[in-house]
Amino acid sequence: MSGSSFGKLFQITTWGESHGTGIGVVVDGCPAGLALCEEDIQVYLDRRKPGQSRFGTPRKEDDAVTIQSGIFEGRTAGTPISMVIYNKNHRSADYSEIASYYRPGHADYTFDCKYGFRDYRGGGRSSARETAGRVAAGAIAARLLAAAGIHFLTYVKSIGPVTVDPARFDAREISQNPLAMPDAAAAAKAGEYLERCMKAQNSAGGVVECIVTGVPAGIGDPVFDKLDAQLAKAVFSIGAVKGFEIGDGFAAAQADGLTNNDAFYYDENGVLRKRSNHAGGILGGISDGSELVFRAAFKPTPSISAVQETVNKKGENITVQVKGRHDPVIVPRAAVVVEAMAALTLADWMLADMGARFEDFLQRYQHEGQ
């Protein structure tokens, strides 16, 4: 199976299955000298680990990370960083009957079409559990970016019909409620909505918004490797994502040019700024120095206990009730996955951008006195 690697210079390869021995990632291309320990990575993994609230899967996993290589005396060595997270609470028997039919909304059918067989234990590589490796790698990328003054604010903007009210936005609330929403009132309403979904053996989707500050102007390329195109690819690689937009996104289609354009001006310190940010921080595929603002739309969790129609491998139409332990909503746990993929994209392209100018090359390699 190809397609398990991401990035060019800051490259990651994830491995493992939902109900295998473990899952992990190899990070290649991280510069040497970055202070890093397992606790730095665990903070990120704790944001996505299962079993933290009634609105997530009851599967209990510590998601404790072990760094196996690439670190010496508390700093990155410039060599591949290998990390593993062992699965401790997998119950493959919950999925034994899935081998005979195709679950609605899952990749069971498409995996069989491509490979001729599949790992039916929780979906194998198509399981959301694969994202733990991405988050571990993203934690390293985010730490690298933080050293350059780049920071992330990622949260749940909406769940089902409930959307955060900008007038009540409070970033402190993100870590104070199980739905990672920066609006206590919206979080309470979303919780009530999820309770109704769970009672009906149903699930919900939602939207994650990510704001990145400190990104310098000039990152990205103007044609096929636009920064927004790379972010879209990164975010769309997350299994349950069905939509991506940056800046005003689809709302820009309803605007006119005069209101959609972001006017430039110089502030009192002579720094070029924009009076608005409808573009979301990217112009012509290249960062413009303002905040990067983008959103990812997640579909409802396809594993639900309600009766659904499907087919089996005998060519019969059947009804099923999916067994196992599943999230009624994956959006709160997915927020850190979105952040991780954004961090990986930025780290990769910022390293690539170091070779964009001749003077940067000379500054790094020209001998003194020449």
Image: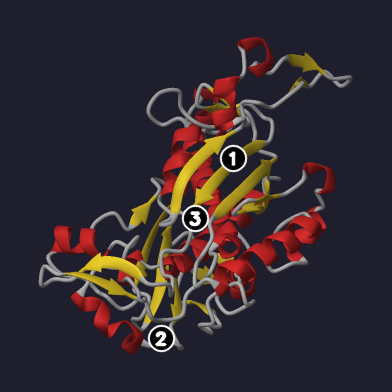
Q: Mark 3 against mark 1, which lies toward the viewer?
A: 1
Q: In terms of secondary structure, where does tag 1 sit?
A: strand
Label 3 and label 1: CA atoms lie apart by: 25 Å
Q: Could you tell which of marks 1 and 2 lies nearer the N-terminus?
A: 2
Question: Which residue is outermost to the right?
Answer: 268
The percent coordinates of residue 283 (x first, y second) are: 56, 23
Q: Residue at x 40, y 65 (%)?
A: 26
Looking at the picture, how far across and down is residue 63, in whole percent? 53, 78
**Numbered badge on residue 30:** 3
The three-letter code of the residue at mark 1 reads Phe
**Displayed quadrant of residue 332:** bottom right
User: In the image, is residue 235 above or below residue 122?
Assistant: above
Which image quarter holds the N terminus? bottom left
Above or below 138: residue 210: above
Residue drawn at x 37%, y 72% as measured from the top left: 307
User: Of the residues tagged 3 and 2, which is closer to the observer?
Assistant: 2
- In depth, the one of 279 and 271 nearer the eye is 279
Type of the residue with mark 2:
His
The residue identified by callout 2 is 90
Q: Which mark is residue 294?
A: 1
Residue 235 horizontal side relative to residue 147, left or right: left
Residue 33 appears in the picture as rendered:
no
- Contact (Cβ within 8 Å) of mark 1 with mark 2: no
CA gap between label 1 and label 2 equals 34 Å
Residue at image point 59% right, 28% down: 251
Total labels: the figure holds: 3
